[in-house]
Amino acid sequence: MAVMEVRTALNEALREEMQRDPNVFVIGEEVAEYDGAYKVTKGLLADFGPQRVYDTPISESGFTGLSVGAAMLGLRPVVEYMSFNFSMVAFDQIISNALKMSYMTGGMFNIPIVFRGPNGAAAQVSSQHSHCMESIFAHFPGCHVIAPSMPKDYKGLLKSAIRSNDPVIFLENEMLYGFKDEVPEGEFLIPIGKGEIKRAGEHVTIIAHARMLHYALAAASELAKEGIEAEVLDPRTIKPLDMPLIAESIKKTNRAIVVEEGHYFCGVGAQMAYEIQSQLFDWLDAPVLRVAQSENPMPYAKNLEADTLPSIEKIIRAAKEVLYLER
Amino acid sequence: MAVMEVRTALNEALREEMQRDPNVFVIGEEVAEYDGAYKVTKGLLADFGPQRVYDTPISESGFTGLSVGAAMLGLRPVVEYMSFNFSMVAFDQIISNALKMSYMTGGMFNIPIVFRGPNGAAAQVSSQHSHCMESIFAHFPGCHVIAPSMPKDYKGLLKSAIRSNDPVIFLENEMLYGFKDEVPEGEFLIPIGKGEIKRAGEHVTIIAHARMLHYALAAASELAKEGIEAEVLDPRTIKPLDMPLIAESIKKTNRAIVVEEGHYFCGVGAQMAYEIQSQLFDWLDAPVLRVAQSENPMPYAKNLEADTLPSIEKIIRAAKEVLYLER
Amino acid sequence: MGSQSSEKIKKGKGLDSKSDDIAPEKWVEMLERMLLIRRFEEATVKGYQQKKIGGFLHTYIGMEAVGVGSIAHKRPEDSVITTYRCHGLALAVGLSPDAGMAELYGKITGCARGKGGSMHFFSKELNFLGGHGIVGGQFGPGIGAAFAFKYKNTGGVSFIHFGDGATPQGSFHECLNLASLWSLPAIFICEDNQYGMGTANHRALANTDMSQMAISYNVKGYRIDGMDLFTVHHEMAKVVEEVRSTQRPALVHMVTYRYKGHSVSDKEAYRTKDEVQRWMAKDPIQTVSAYLIEKGIRSEAEIKEIDKQIRTRIQASVEFAENSPLPPEEELTMHTFHDTLEA
Amino acid sequence: MGSQSSEKIKKGKGLDSKSDDIAPEKWVEMLERMLLIRRFEEATVKGYQQKKIGGFLHTYIGMEAVGVGSIAHKRPEDSVITTYRCHGLALAVGLSPDAGMAELYGKITGCARGKGGSMHFFSKELNFLGGHGIVGGQFGPGIGAAFAFKYKNTGGVSFIHFGDGATPQGSFHECLNLASLWSLPAIFICEDNQYGMGTANHRALANTDMSQMAISYNVKGYRIDGMDLFTVHHEMAKVVEEVRSTQRPALVHMVTYRYKGHSVSDKEAYRTKDEVQRWMAKDPIQTVSAYLIEKGIRSEAEIKEIDKQIRTRIQASVEFAENSPLPPEEELTMHTFHDTLEA
Ligand SMILES: Cc1ncc(C[n+]2csc(CCOP(=O)(O)OP(=O)(O)O)c2C)c(N)n1
Ligand SMILES: Cc1ncc(C[n+]2csc(CCOP(=O)(O)OP(=O)(O)O)c2C)c(N)n1
Ligand SMILES: [Mg+2]
Ligand SMILES: [Mg+2]
């Protein structure tokens, strides 16, 4: 096991898959000569050359559409958005073209594209630069949505995403790019649609992904000090959701909270909570509770930004509430 | 009470508000000389002149952005998307500019825009032209989302929307434009955020909006034949949701199903079901069930289109299931 | 960096002048193709009125010379992409009328298994990349095809057709810039039929000479009389050859007209019958038929016979569509994804 | 429809030639404004390094002549809108450095109550419409302001600033077309600082002479040496006057440079120190200072004194920001909406 940063794990995944399949290419703003705004694509231009790594103008709609066409003819684009906020100017290309192509052609064409880049709030980048897009893309049939938390998951899932023959929305997190952890040596894949228990416990299930998984682990440590054993479940893939794993956990704990970094209304937590209450109604000793952003755009000021986002404290409070220890 | 079509009710609302406030103007594709693709803006050009009604090029991003700027300087644009599918090419302008402006300027600027147009599936218009956008817009703080079902609601809510000083997403339904019903004479407003019980009942609450409200009423009639009295609740506004009304109904029926025309994953039904189960957990005798589209883009073929959409039969089945009469 | 100014409009110079650079049998073939499109579209209108065809229906009637004259230069390795007004080009490329008509009838035998409908004809075999419903939505995939040809060095050229109404859509500009910047073999072919729905193009475009937009992107711009099959064929021969050999994109502004409403439900209050008549006087099927007769390549009777056979062919496709089965229930969620994830 | 070809680049003709059409005290005022921007930006970099300022930070250093020379012609009824690189223009328009610095420090006394931050300076009073973070996002609101001026007949002109990197974004083209089509009084001012982040503009644009894009939209295009305050001031006087009187939009390509990295975290591997030096040799603050001394309008000592006072002013704004309170907790959801709906 090597210990590496998330960005290195992603870089390895890209390299291995580019090596494996000459049809895989990387495209986006500053991905080549600049080595990527967050250095995820570092060295790819040097090692694979300009035929495989493309710096684009600031034309997200254009290069997203281009990637759809390239995919229709058998290439396998990995599209980097400098941040997923900018996917909004390419929204129609993603939703109307990439996600519809297989179905509306009766399966004649398929779109093996990975759309990747940082998602969610960075530090104090304010209202236009802090969106969590998981629920938005997951809403539409025709794509898988992945949002890992740990270096090994980033690597194993990005490799699976690149090999997928369908569009994958691969959400990274700027605040985690520098996070280090162990990653298995050599080739490995993590299947799309499989979650993982990141900490076992029996009193309450905390479902959290991406940056929130780390918050959930911290909250679980705190809770343990008070004798509350929280099980921390990382879905890793947002869609399709690993309901068997979630069910297994909740059948044990009988209580669940769902944490997400993004907005509350129709967030992924709403869907998860719905699935849980409709499939596991008789197993629940309390309603599922959610932790998400407060109902406002992201403010710049540090104190307000912190108040907007979920926090370890908010997770602890929700866990206790669902245990009826606090109300 | 006059009996009129939804499109006429909308036209009256536009006229009354344009008369009332010279800063209200209408902008969109084919809204002026063509009288609107669906004739909602019929006669406005003739009666209010080209200073108030603007035909645009096919530049949704451009004219949406233009409307944001106009609103910042005190005008009150009513933006028509020929269909809400086309709002996707303007997505960034709506989300990053219109919905953020008030907050990120500390309330210095506000955006009194109504974004309106047909939403949802028409008849056999296939994968790219059949989106239901309510959950997408409702996800983001900073707008109200309205989706009425009856002519009077369309009129009273559009008038309120135009008077709102905040962005409003006003979702119409092509299949309902020709639907006729009574509309009160003279000036009236329906407040944003208030639902309405469209049929009273005590066994189960069916929550449904827009076209689905009509399906729900038909289902309720069928259910009544079997002695099941369904209460049909039309939220009318999707966000903010009228939870007091929903709570009142469910405290009576103890069972609920939520119907929406759109996609299932992170649909508005997920949020509604979450609110219900978390706020009314102890009042529920069964898990909340949802009826929504099957997990695929909209197909063209008539039979597959029908299979994709919710139907009266599917609603009846869900109502019985939640009553444990069928499983 | 310099820029090339757009060339003057290539007007029909009269069929006689240089039309002999096309072999006589090629003329006949193109006439047949135009007739196939015309009769197919007439049948779709009928099917729509009979409510056998649903959704929106946009016909190519009047614009046949644009599609047939351009696509005549398409090689198998080239691709074609267009708007929702896609039947004509699909047939020009070689789609069978059966597969097209069955698609319109929503049948499993359709070219998209009944899932796409009128706006979404596709054929992988023919490199026909659709059939796109969002105005401006096809530019990206169109340059993506060119990108793939270059990536794989196939020698292919991407034909990107679009309406005049799509030029004020940002994606047009993003993609033309990208295509030029990266020297992608793509031809942007504007089918300027004077209107986007009810909007005359001077009400949508500050400059209605689209070929001038080439300057912004340092590519060549052409303006061609799209009602004149000879001119289209002749000029496009040069354009396609140049794009193929130089791997530089080009912008072509075809001046044409649609005879029917935007879609079948259009009342056409925005134009006069007289205007429509004036354009119909340039009808390419009429003109080419007259030319073939005049030159003695085919007699009037022979052309009538060709038309009759084509009508029969189209009638057969209607019957094929009628008699084909609906997509079975298991098609419902099938094709949402290509892969099946392990459960 | 005709089109006007873009005019030749307006190079600095040397300050002597016609600079006397600017009153001496106006020169001093503009120098002060440029210095105010320079010193403010230097302080923001310091605040950022001290971690008192968060998020992204993009400075206007090197580009002061563009903002100051253009905005000199702004009347109170005119509006200005720009990108995230907004501090310079906000100060040029008249924003108090206190309100700007406090915004950067995330304080309630900031020009957006601490909610906007570096990328989102706003002032309703000054018709400063922001501070926009999405590349190309401000074009729409910019022409919307022009639309409102026309609607209300206020005589206002909308100044729309943007980077070279924004021209391949579709919204630029959509909005320039709309502005021309509807004759909106808007000036599109491209601050071409040679790069969009690490991408030299010849790697993003097939034609790097942006002024030529005017042809596509039938508007006038200008190319101006943006390092030369005199030229900017002189040429923009004519442009603003023409846009105001004709109500026709214009496109202005300002050739300029940013001395610092794209944002504070930029390592600048994409350009040489030498290149930066060459541009810095044209520094407008240096040039104008030298001119004032040469002409005897101000002595070197007087200019030093001006600079000192400005530094003091900026230092005061830093202290103001430091000492201002954070936004109180009740600000959290406040301003998400303007109206409160009845419960
Ligand atoms: C983005 C978008 N906006 C609006 C529409 C609705 N619409 C469909 S066709 C059309 C007119 C297009 O005109 P043009 O590009 O000239 O093509 P034509 O139909 O004349 O061939 C419009 C507005 C759409 N499909 N997509
Ligand atoms: C739509 C979008 N894509 C990408 C970005 C990230 N980004 C921020 S600034 C920038 C470069 C812009 O360059 P330019 O327009 O030349 O302005 P400059 O920073 O040079 O003033 C990029 C790519 C963004 N903010 N918005
Ligand atoms: Mg047209
Ligand atoms: Mg730049």
Image (cartoon, coloured by chain):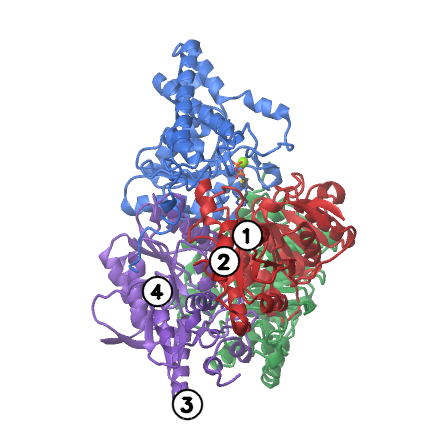
Chain colours: A red, B purple, C green, D blue
Q: Secondary structure at mark 3?
A: loop
Kind of residue at disc 1: Ser
Residue located at (37% from left, 74% from top): B251
Q: Is residue D101 above or below residue D135?
A: above
> Do pointers 2 and 4 mark residues of a single chain?
no
Of the residues tagged 1 and 4, which is closer to the observer? 1
Callout 4: SS: loop
Mark number displayed over residue A87 = 1
Label whose residue precedes the other's in the sequence (2 or 1): 1
Does the closest atom of ligand 1 sit within 8 Å of the Cβ of label 4? no
Q: Give a yes or no on whether discs 2 and 1 share a subunit.
A: yes
Residue underneath mark 3 = B226
D198 relative to B194 in the view: left or right: right
Q: Nearer the viewer, residue B161 or D78?
A: B161
Give coordinates of residue A297: x percent, y percent: 44, 49
Where is mark 2, residue-wise? Answer: A320
Q: Nearer the viewer, residue C31 or D318?
A: D318
Alpha carbon distance from label 3 to label 4:
46 Å
Could you say where residue D230 lies in the image, as x and y percent from the top left? Answer: 43, 23
Local crowd size for mark 4, using a 10 Å CA cut-off: few (<14), some (14–19), many (≥20): many
Q: Is residue D90 left or right of residue C5?
A: left
Q: Disc 3 vs disc 2: Cβ atoms closer than 8 Å?
A: no
Q: CA distance from mark 2 to mark 1?
A: 37 Å
Q: Secondary structure at mark 1?
A: helix
Chain of the residue that carries numbered disc 2 in the rendered image? A
Mark 1 and mark 4 on one chain: no
Q: Quadrant of residue D203?
A: top right
**Which structural element holds mark 2?**
helix
Q: Position of residue D1 (x, y in %)?
A: 44, 48
Residue D118: x %, y % from top left: 46, 37
Q: Which residue is mark 4?
A: B35
